[in-house]
Image (cartoon, rainbow, N blue to C red):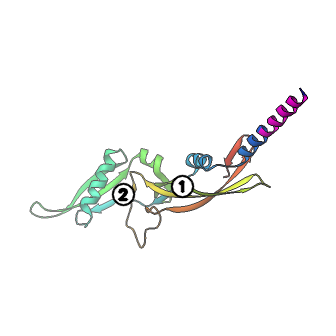
Amino acid sequence: MKQLLKLSFFTFLLISTHACKSQTKLSSEKAMTILTKNFKVSCSKRLLFSFNSYNKQYNTNMRNATSAEKNGLVTINKRFISGIGGGGRYEITLRPTEAMKSEYFVGNKKYRIADGVVTEILGISHDKNTNKATVRFSYKYRTNDLYYLRGKIHGKRVACSTETFEDEATFTLYDTGWRLDK
């Protein structure tokens, strides 16, 4: 009987020790779940709010503006400027709707045109002394409806590009589980 009691106690200790150890290690799956929910990075740019019919990109700009208008983001105003014999030059102005301003405006005449999305956990480093873990991960920008209304692009376009970026985040282990540090 004593042997059975000792064996049961030893089994209990082994299981509880294993459960505690598995809780202290942050898994890639758990890190991905937390980052997907809490990682917030966006790319913002000034938008193209006016152009004219002599612009080389007129057809593309009109197609993008029309799409944004259908989605309730802008209203289009087309104003005749000059011309003779049926031809002419038009000035196109786009006015952002309240819905667009409330959802995408970030300040300083800039609008959010893309959001970062975590694509992969590259590695996790645990610090047992502080109950912290550093997670290295990659992300890409996913564009939204305003992406094609951005203004002129000067030089290399690094931000909001389709390339993959890398970043780090720190997690802390609490008695309720792992949390992303702000």
Residue 110 within the magenta-colored segment of the rendering: no
Residue 97 vs 129, above or below: the answer is above
Image point 27% across, 56% down: which residue? Answer: 62
Question: Disc 2, disc 1: CB below 8 Å?
Answer: no
Seen from the viewer's position, the closer of residues 67 and 26 is: 26
The residue mark sitting in front, 2 or 1, is: 1
What amino acid is labelled 2 in the image? Leu
Q: Residue furthest bottom?
A: 155
What amino acid is labelled 1 in the image? Glu
Name the side, left or right, on which 166 lies relative to 171.
left
Name the side, left or right, on which 86 lies relative to 166.
left
Could you say whether the residue bearing mark 1 is in a helix, strand or loop? Answer: strand
Instruction: Please provide percent x and percent y for residue 172.
Output: 71, 50
Residue bearing mark 1: 120
Residue bearing mark 2: 149
Q: Main secondary structure of the magenta part?
A: helix
Give me the C-alpha separation between circle 2 and circle 1: 29 Å
Q: Residues within 10 Å of mark 2 (few under 14, many from 20)?
A: many
Does any portion of residue 138 appear in the rendered image?
A: yes
Image point 57% across, 45% down: which residue? Answer: 37
Instruction: Please provide percent x and percent y for residue 123.
Output: 62, 58
Q: Residue furthest right?
A: 2
Seen from the viewer's position, the closer of residues 34 and 46 is: 34
Residue 98 image-quadrant placement? top left
**Residue range of the region highlighted in magenta in the rendering:** 2-14
Seen from the viewer's position, the closer of residues 97 and 62 is: 62
Residue 104 vs 163, above or below: the answer is above
Q: Residue furthest top?
A: 1
Instruction: Please provide percent x and percent y for residue 85.
Output: 9, 62
Quadrant of image for the N terminus: top right
